[in-house]
Image (spheres, rainbow, N blue to C red):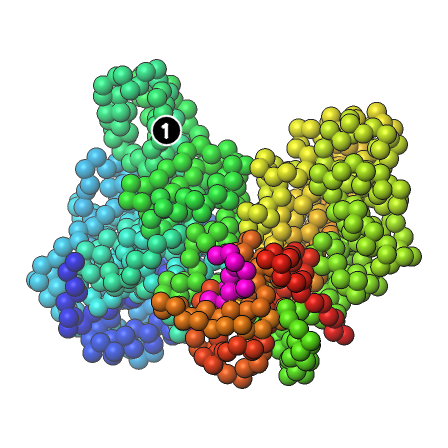
Amino acid sequence: MPSPSTGTPWVVLKFGGTSVSQRHRWDTIGRLARKRADDGGGRALVVVSALSGVTNELTAIADGADDGAARVDALVARHRDFVQALDLDPDAVLGERLTALQALLADARAAARMLDWQAEVLAQGELLSSTLGAAYLRSQGLDVGWADARDWLDAIELPNQSEWGRRLSVSCRREADDAWRARFAAQPARLLITQGFIARHGDGGTAVLGRGGSDTSAALFGGLLRARGVEIWTDVPGMFTANPREVPDARLLARLDYAEAQEIATTGAKVLHPRSLGPCRVTGVPMAILDTERPDLPGTRIDGDASEVPGVKAISRRNGIVLVSMETVGMWQSVGFMADIFERFRRHGLSVDLIGSAETNVTVSLDPSENLVSTDVLAKLSEDLSQICRVKVIAPCAAITLVGRGMRSLLHKLSEVWATFGQERVHLISQSSNDLNLTFVIDEADADGLLPELHAQLIESGAMPVADATVFGPSWNEIQFGKPERAPAWWQGDDARERLLTLAQPGTPAYVYHLPTVRARAQALKAVAAVDRRFYAIKANAHPAILRTLEAEGFGLECVSQGEIEHVFDTLPGLAPARVLFTPSFAPHTEYDAAFARGVTVTLDNVEALRRWPETFRGRDLWLRVDLGRGDGHHAKVVTGGAASKFGLPLEAINAFAREVRALGGRITGIHAHLGSGIDHPKHWRGVYAELAAIADGVGTVDTIDLGGGLTIPYKPEDLPFDLEAWAQGLAEIKAAWPRYRLAIEPGRFLVAESGALLVRVTQVVDKLGTRRVGLDGGMNALMRPAMYDAWHGVHNLSRWGDGNEVACDVVGPICESSDVLGLKRKLPAATAPDDVMLVADAGAYGYVMANHYNLRGLPREDVLE
Ligand code: ADP
Ligand code: ASP
Ligand code: MG
């Protein structure tokens, strides 16, 4: 790859619509342009878009909108006002240009909406913005020249391009000779300002580069001038792993190579025009994407030296995709069928994007940003194609694309992504031959709300390697609102640590539960007004002090076995049975009898039990656990929905279940679903509630909807706390839509996980072949989660609290199993040695209750702290 010529004086800065629509941003533009020129000892070229929204208006005018004259008047007024706001004289600065804009309406070509006239209309936005900007910067004392981009960028005709493309979505010549460069440099001012988006057509008229094409103008200038860099200044601080306005958890992509950036741009990330990468790539000019409002943020850097990191980098979405499905008989047998088809697309100047084929069907997609896919064009194409096959046009569709290096080797990590798409009607799946993308085409309406969910799944599954800081930066939310302040854990205070060291004395491993933390979580949930009934899922932690604490906070208790029920009533003898739920899985039927005898609420999830033990269920009120056909959760092993899961009654069996209950003289009074555990996207529950309410409406006798639990906690330092507010708001919205049902929840983890610490002692520290292992006296026997779910728990050396954590160690237990690992590559104090007391954090849920005697090691002790 050629490297940009050293010593080039030029740097190119492109400012988008929002960056040029306010006075203070023009101050920034002036400052940045001067600074960049100074830094390089040279010159800066500023490329600008039209003021925000202006190109939309011009497009409507060019398309012949009825109220074209009124729109022109509004544009004139808007530009005059803005010039006034810049303390300049509108007539002196823009008089001529505004007259030219008005004259275009009266142009002879207007009636027929000739393409050259349309291009000229569209070009006015950039001509206006660059003119007023140059005037303002000069008024601020800057040495700024104005260049007409059409004098420097020449549109070229691509083979088979439609007339529309040749005028309104042009590509430009990428080569220039030294004479061109010399002429450009001969423009006197040190800073130059020119227009994005517009170029000279071969006939001398105006052409435009297509929507968003200003980025490409800047890149073209960058390549032609062999610039030191091209900076795209916009309204977001870089390219993100998804559109941050749709996915607030999207992460900044700090560094990309041209190929990946190209793929992300091409597949829908509007922040960069897809044709802008090429000119920079072939000349080796580095690009950056930066935020005009926050110019000090580092943004995204794109160049040829970025190291190749495998994994999904982004998920993007394109709307307005048109699918053309072509059905024929025996297509593979007929030589040249494909050629016939594509010849017809060529004839209509349409470039095909994705292709899917089956024995008798070929389906292709057309991208509206590359094609004029008007109804007229599609009708003509269909007519033409119908001579050789049956044609069906499916629109509007959305193409959702995962972009990243090595997609093929990631397929095993995408099971949840496939499952999510499994609920939609997928028209086409396409995997690019460069192994950089995987695209799903679905109906546009189905795509709404899907991206945040998919994005979370990509991170959860490890397919998007966000821990790699060379590529992934902070999330949009974090940049907007700062890193969420995580209150220090209860055990971090000096007093608490001293007490824990004392509690470790009698012996480890030992669990310690901090009851004030349990209370605080309980109170946070009690503040969620939409919830009517709260139960604590005691399987998370059945310690009597915790049950008593939560009962006192008004929580009922949810049990999954007869043993748990008995434990609950032993611990709280006076507890009203109405405050106890029994939600077992494949329990022996005698446990149902015992539960009914206790008077607790029983949940059932299959018809078979009703049929086999009618006497058990006769005349009973029951809650029904349904399977909504999908699951969710932090790990495949905690997903509790979908065909592969043993839990829940499938939707198609609900009527049979209801008939059976009625025949036994019973009633279904509650509907319950629990899709999984450790779910961190709060909108999940809102959707579940809506589905359950619809089922409840059908059943008729239901008074309570139980959403289960599943609320997560932030285990890793970079995890965000569960967004209780968003969760509450979602529930409130849906509750308002179905006010007749009482809403129940039954969280476990959320209430107790953070209250628990596991204390263990270091047994041995061993260096083996470059890996340091810190061995503990409790491992998967004391805390099963890491071995079972690859769960992450913080590990801290309490005995050496003040020391730095500088050595990466694998933290392992004493069990004779390779999976007995509590954490990999954890930074611990260098001096960590046998007998040190270590703390494993957030172990209050599914810790002691899952501990075992494996290798005949003893169970951990348990203590509570007030
Ligand atoms: P400009 O007017 O500066 O050219 P654009 O509106 O064309 O700005 O592009 C910036 C917008 O791109 C952002 O406001 C954002 O909504 C959108 N966008 C879509 N996908 C992405 C992404 N992956 N990363 C960053 N921004 C994106
Ligand atoms: N003003 C044009 C548009 O909005 C070009 C651009 O901003 O790149 O599409
Ligand atoms: Mg843009």
Q: Mark 1 vs ligand 1: CB under 8 Å?
A: no
Residue 814, magenta (yes or no): yes
Q: 535 left or right of 570?
A: left
Q: Residue furthest front?
A: 856
As rendered, which of 683 and 856 lies closer to the eye?
856
Q: Where residue 167 sits: x, y (%)?
A: 26, 43
Q: Residue at x 18, y 72 (%)?
A: 9
Q: Where residue 799 sits: x, y (%)?
A: 57, 81
* Count of numbered tags: 1
Q: Residue at x 54, y 72 (%)?
A: 763
As rendered, which of 33 and 52 lies closer to the eye?
33
Q: Is residue 284 above or below residue 805?
A: above
As rendered, which of 221 and 484 lies closer to the eye?
484
Residue 347, magenta (yes or no): no
Q: Where residue 281 sits: x, y (%)?
A: 22, 56
Q: 768 left or right of 532?
A: left
Q: Residue at x 35, y 18 (%)?
A: 328
Q: Residue at x 39, y 47 (%)?
A: 410
Q: Is residue 680 visible?
A: yes
Q: Is residue 610 above or below residue 754?
A: above
As rendered, which of 866 and 37 lies closer to the eye?
866
Q: Is residue 11 above or below residue 403?
A: below
Q: 162 left or right of 554?
A: left
Quadrant including the N terminus: bottom left
Which residue range is magenta in the image?
A: 808-823
Q: Where residue 812 sits: x, y (%)?
A: 51, 65
Quadrant including the C terminus: bottom right
Give SS at disc 1: strand
* Amino acid at pointer 1: Thr
Q: Is residue 757 visible?
A: no
**Which residue, given by chain and number where applicable, does mark 1 sit on?**
363
**Residue 490 appears in which quarter of the rendering?**
bottom right
